[in-house]
Amino acid sequence: MTTTNERPSLKELKVPAETRTSSRKPAAMPARPPKRLRTRLRENWMLTLFAIPAMVILLLFHYFPLLGNVIAFQDYLPFLGIDGSEWVGFDNFAILFNGDPAFLNAVKNTLVITFVQTVFVFPAPIVLALLLNSLVSNRLKGAVQSIMYLPHFLSWVIVVSVFQQLLGGSGFFNNWIRQHGGDALSIIGNPDGFIALITSQVMWKDTGWATILFLAVLSQIDTDLYEASSVDGASRWRQLWHITLPGMRGIIILLLILKLGDSLTVGFEQIILQQAAVGVGASEVIDTYVYNNGIVGGNWGVAAAVGLVKGVISVVLVLGANKLAHLFGESGVYQK
């Protein structure tokens, strides 16, 4: 006999072993080994089939041409080809370290244009997306979006021609000034205003199109957050600062990383079309320097060396910015 203060053991109660071990933490399941590449391809053969054309295009037009960078180490002559051109090692890279004034001027103009366009052009689609998102009428919102998207589909030849017809010496704006007794303004051919001119052209052409991503992100923000904040007495500015902008932070950081990687490319076609009007000193950037020295000047090896260094620096900037984004808790361009 057992007293009321004594508790019978599991052995006395003859509890089955299955019952006695049921309260223990279950053993962790062994990790499933990753599937082999052949198995994944077999299971997703249809997706692989659709991806093959894009992979072929990337290989032919993006990765295979990278082999042509070998001319950066040659005194390359087109009629001799890569096999017949003389190898000169790193002699073509000497221009990067000897302080060539034309090259330094191109680097300076590139950095200045990149800074100005980052400050003024990059935030423009964010502001426009916020304004469009605040419109109550979906019909009005769709009409405004359609109008803002149209300039993106125009080539730079047409865009430059439109600005020439509006702001040129014989354009609409100067003709209107002359009719009212004023003096014509030098806008298109003024070297001092070239950076402002190309920045305004980029804003007019691409701001509407760039709002697509931001509008898509705004549509994914939970509307219950706005309703709850309104009940708590939050103003529109508080909602913008604490709900809208944090919801857009991921895409903003992603686009900033891509912008940083593309910072040494500021629009070759746009600038080369207007370079004759303002001169090389005010408009020469790295891309036009490569064109003027390689194709026009015949210094193929030097131009290839400059382009190769530019590509390497761009890759380093993207990787560094992506690592910085990871430190701030954002996914960035990719994750390990």
Image (cartoon, grey):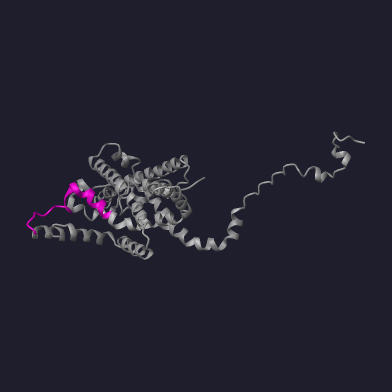
**Residue 184 belongs to magenta span:** yes
Residue 195 on image: x %, y %:
23, 48
Residue furthest left in the image: 181
Residue 73 shows in this picture: no
Residue 132 on image: x %, y %:
35, 57
Extent of the magenta region = 180-202
Q: Nearer the viewer, residue 104 or 91?
A: 104
Q: Nearer the viewer, residue 286 or 233?
A: 233
State the count of labels: 0
Q: Is residue 107 left or right of residue 126?
A: left
**Residue 7 belongs to magenta span:** no
The residue located at (43%, 59%) in the rendering is 57
Quarter holding residue 216: bottom left
Where, quadrant-wise, is the N terminus in this rendering? Answer: top right
The answer to whether residue 155 is above or below residue 186 is: below
Residue 96 shows in this picture: yes
Residue 291 on image: x %, y %:
27, 51
Residue 94 on image: x %, y %:
30, 39
The residue located at (18%, 48%) in the rendering is 191
The answer to whether residue 165 is above or below residue 90 is: below
The residue located at (50%, 60%) in the rendering is 51
The answer to whether residue 140 is above or below residue 336 is: below
Residue furthest right in the image: 1
Quarter holding residue 272: bottom left
